[in-house]
Image (cartoon, grey):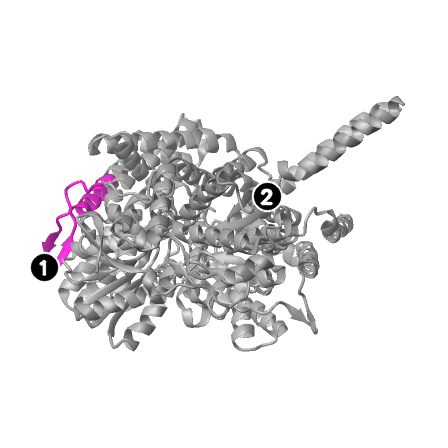
Amino acid sequence: MTAGRGAGNLAALAGFAALVAAAPWLLPNDYYLSTLILAFLNAMIVIGLNLLLGYAGQISLGHGAFYGLAAYTTAVLTAAHGWPVGAGCAAGVALTAAVAYLISIPTLKLAGNSLAMATLGFGLIVHIVFNEAIAITGGPSGFVGIPRLALFGRVFESDLEYYFLVGGVLVLLAWAALNLIDSRVGRAMRAIHTSERAAEAVGIDITGAKRFIFVLSAAYAGLAGVLYAHYLCFVAPSSFGFHFSVTLIVMVVLGGMASVWGAVAGAVFLTVLPEFLRAFEDVETLLYGAILVLCVVFVPQGIAGGASRLGRALLARLGAARRPHAP
Amino acid sequence: MDTASLLQYLVSGLTVGSTYGLTALGFTIIFNTTGIINFAQGEFVMLGGMLAVILGQALGLPLVPAVLGAVALTTLAGGLVERLAIRPARGASPIQLVIVTIGVSILIRGLVMLLWGKDTFALPHFSGMRPILFAGAAMLPQSLWVLAVTLTLLAALRAFFTATIHGKAMLACSHDPGAAALVGVNVRRMVLASFMLSALVGAVGGVILAPLTMTAYDVGILLGLKGFAACILGGLGNPFGAAAGGLILGVLEAFGAGLVSSAYKDAITFIILLALLFARPTGLFGARSADRV
Amino acid sequence: MKTVRLFAVLAAVCLMTLSLAPARAAEPVKIGAVLSVTGPASFLGEPEKNTLLLLQDRINAAGGILGRPLELVIYDDETDVNKCVLAVDKLLKKDRVVAVIGPTVSGNTLAVMNKFPAAKVPMISCAAAEKITRPVNPWVFKTPQSDRQAVARILDHLRQAGLSRVAILTVSDGFGQAGRAVLAEMLPAGGFTLVADEIYGPKDTDMTPQLTKIKGLAPDAIVCWGTNPGPAVIARNRVQLGIRTPLYMSHGVASNKFIELAGEAAEGLLLPAGRMVAVEQIEDGNPQKDVLAAYVADYAARFGAPPSTFGGYAHDALALVRAAIETSGSAEPRAIRDALEATTGFVGATGVFNFSPEDHNGLDPSSFVMVGIENGAWKVLR
C-alpha cells in the first residue's frame, strides 16, 4: 500500500516536473511566463497551507503576513544593508519560521473560528506595521531597489531562468510535502484532524505536531516570499493583506483539501483566471465571484477530487467496455 | 488630558463601535442556524445603504420609502443568496460554504459596481446635522439613531432566539440539523429564513449608517472584517456579545487614536483583542465552545 | 493564349491590390495603458480610462496620427502591483506597443519602471511621486505635478494669512504618505511649526478622535492630505466638533464629488487645484483655457459629469505622445522618447510642459492655483 502510493507519488512528481520543464515551449508568448512564475509562487504557499488546513485541520488567515514578512526581511537586508541575496533569503525564511513558532504558542491553543480570528489579527497587525514603519519598509507606496536573485555567483536575470528556478523549487517542495504526508508526522497530523482526543489517547504529541506543521507551512510561505521579492524587485504592503490570505484559503479549498496536487491546481487556476477574465473588463469581478460559487457547487471535492473522480469514471468506463470481450 | 476630550473619544468610539456591532448582529443569526460565518454579511450592510441612496436619487423617492424599500430589497437579496448559492451547495462542508459566501460577496460587490459605479454616496441625516453638545463633547443626532437601533435590534434578536419557537428552531438547526429535522423542524426553511433575517438586520444597519459613514460598493469589506472581529470578541452566536464586542472595538480604536497613535490605532485594537482571545478563547460573553471552521 | 490572358489579368489584380493595400488599411499606431480602473485607486483610474477613450475617438475622427489610426490597448491593474507587472509585460511582449501610459498609482509605477529601459519603450506615468522622475530614468516621464508644488502653494497662502502653527492629518495610503513626507519636510524648512502629525485609514469613517486631539493643541491651521471620501468625513467632523481653525485640503479632492459629499461642511475650505475645477474663471489669454474648455465639455457630454483633475493626467500623457509622434514623424519607440524629451511649451490640461534631459516632469508650481469653496462652488483666489 505504502510502497504503491510512494511509486504513484514519484510518477506524479516526475510527470509534473516534465510538464513544468516543457511549459515554456508550449506557451504562445513570453508574457505568460511571468503569470506562471506568480502562479508557482502562490502554489508554494498553498501547498504549505494545505498541509496545515487540509491535513492537520488548522486554519490560518495569516499566511499573507508570513509571505510578506519574508519578502520584506530579505528586501530590507539586501537593499538597505547590503547583505548578499542568498543570506537575505535565508534570513527571511528563518525569521518567518521563528515568528511562526512564537505566535503558535498562544494561537494553536485556539480552535475553529477563534483560531481564524487570532491568525487574522496577527496578519492585520503585520500589515499595519508594513504600512506605518515607513522608515524601514517604505510605507504604503512600497519598497524599491531590491536586487534580482543571485545565487552562487549567478544572477537570474531573464524570466526564463527565473521560471526554471521557481518551477524547480516548487517540484522540490511538492516532493517534500508528499514525503511528509506519508511519514509518522503525516499520520499524526491526520489523526489530529479526525479527533484530537483520540490522537492524544494513542500517545501523539498533539501540541508538538501542530506546531511543527504550522511552522513548516509558514516556512513554505516564507520561501515563496523571498523568491517573490527578488523576482519583482519591489514589494508593497497591499500584496500581503487580509485579502491575499483569504485568497490563499480559497485556493486550498477550490484545489481540493488534503491534496498536494490540488493545492498546485487551485493556486494556478485562481492566479491565471483573472488574466483570462481581463477581457470582460467591468464584468470581471462579478464573473470571478460567480465562478467561485459555481466551483464549490459543482466540484465540491475541489479540482483534485474532481479530476480523480473523472479519472476513475473514465477507467471504469474503459473497464466496462473491455469486460464483455473477456470470457 | 481634559475630560471633554476623553468624553469625545468615548462618544466617537461608541458611534463607530455601533457600526461594527450592527454588522456583527447579522453574523450571529446565520451562525446560529448554520454554523457558518457569512463573509457576505458586510455586503448586506452595503446593499442596504447603496439601495437607499439609489432609490432616493434615481427614483426620487423621499427618505422614508427609500429606506424601507432598501431594507425590503436587501432582505429579498438575502433570500436569493440562500436559494441560488447556499442551497445548491448543500452537502458541502462548512469551510466550503464559507468559500461560497466569499464568492457571493465578490459577486455582489461586482454587481453593485457594474450597476452604480465606484463613487461614494451620502444619504441625508435622518434628524439634521446640528450636533448635540454635552460636557464639551459633540455628537450628531444620527449617532443616537445608530445606538438606539443597535439596542432595539439586539433586544429583538435576544427575544427571538430565547422566547420564540422559530428562534429556538433556528438554534436547533445549528446544534444538530438531523435531530432538528427529526423533531419536525424544516431545516431548509430555517436556513432560508436565517439568510433573509440577517440580510434584513444588515440592511437596517446599512441605511442607518449611510448618513454618518457614507457608502460605496466596497464599504462592506471593512465592516465585515470588523463585524467578524466583534463577534469573536463577544462570543460567537451571542447577539449581546456581538453588539458589546463591536462597541468595545470602537471605543478601543478611538482611545488608541486619541491617546496613543492614530497610525497604529488598529494594531493596538487587534493586540488587545488577541490578548483577550488568548485569555478567553470562547469570547468575552461566549459560553458554549465554538469549534467550527 | 487563354492562359496567358488569365495570367495577365491575375497579375494586374495582384499589382492593384498591392498598391492599394497601404492606403486602405494603414498599420495602426499601438499605444498601451495600464490604469487602476478598479480597486482602491479607481477614483483615479476610471476618469483616466474614460479620458483615453474620449481622446482616441477624437484623434481617429480627425484622421489618426501620421495618417494611421490610433489603437489603444488599455489594461486594468485593479490597483494591484502583481497585476500591474503582468499587464506591463503583456503590453511590452505581446501587444508590442510603442509607448505606455500609466500606471495610475506611484507604487505600481515604481514597481514596473525598470522594465522600460530594457524594453526600450517610453512610459508616461500618471502618478505623482517624485521618485518616478528623480533621478531621471531616460525612458520614464510623468504628467502630474509633484506634491511639492501643491504644498508650496499652501505654504504661500499660510504665510500671507499669517498662520504659523500647523497640524497635518494624512491618509495612510500612497497618496497620503507622499504628501505627509513633503509636508513634514517643507513646513519646518519654511519657518512653520508642525504641532501635530496625525494619520487616518483610507476606509475610516470617523476622524473625530484625531480632530479632538488636534483641537486640544490649538493650531493656526490644519492641512489634510487624502482623497475621497476621507477628507469629506474630516470636513464634516470638523463642523461637528465646532472647530473654526482654517482647513486646507490637497488637490486630491479637487472634484465636484467632494463638495457633494461634504455638503455644507465644505464651505470655506481651501486647496491647491489645477485650473480644470473652474474653467470659466481662468483669466482670458491663458493658453490652457481653450484646451481645458474643450476637454471638460467633451468629457461631460460623453460621460455625464465633468472630469476630475486626474483625468487630465491621462489627457496630457496621450496628447504628449501624439505630439511627439507627429513632430518626429515616426512612431518608433526611440523616436517618441527623443521627441518627448525635447518637448517644450506644450499646453496640457494640467499645465504647460517643458521637458528636458534633466526634467521628465516639466511642470512648475504655476500649474496650481489656490481655490476656495464658496456657496458650494469653486472660487479661484487671486
Q: Is residue C121 left or right of residue C187?
A: right
Task: Tell me where residue C273 appears, x and y as whole percent.
Answer: 30, 57
C-alpha separation, residue under disc 1 versus residue under disc 2: 70 Å
As rendered, which of A96 and C6 lies closer to the eye? C6
Q: Are marks 1 and 2 on the same chain?
A: no
* Residue on which the image places disc 2: C28
Chain letter, disc 1 residue: B
Give the vertical position of C198 relative to A186 (above or below): below
Q: Residue B25 in the image: x percent, y percent?
A: 31, 43
Q: Give the image location of residue A150, x and y in percent.
A: 66, 70
In the foreground, B46 or C48: C48
Measuring 41% from the left and 32% from the top, which residue is drawn there? B191
- Residue type at the position of mark 2: Pro
Q: Judge whether residue B136 is colored magenta.
A: yes
Q: Secondary structure at mark 2?
A: loop
Give the residue pinned by disc 1: B135
**Which residue does the image show at 34% across and 49% down from the upper left?**
C290
In this view, the residue in front, C80 or C295, is C295
Residue C60 is situated, as x and y percent measured from the top left of the image, at 51, 40
| Vertical position of residue A236 compared to residue B122: above or below | below
Q: Amino acid at mark 1?
A: Ala
Chain ID of residue with mark 2: C
The residue segment tinted magenta is B124-153
- Asked if the stretch drawn in magenta spans residue B281, the answer is no
Residue A230 location, quadrant: bottom right
Q: Tell me whether circle 1 and circle 2 mark residues in contact (CB < 8 Å).
A: no
Q: Is residue C203 above or below residue B102?
A: below
**On the image, which quarter does residue C352 sit in?**
bottom left
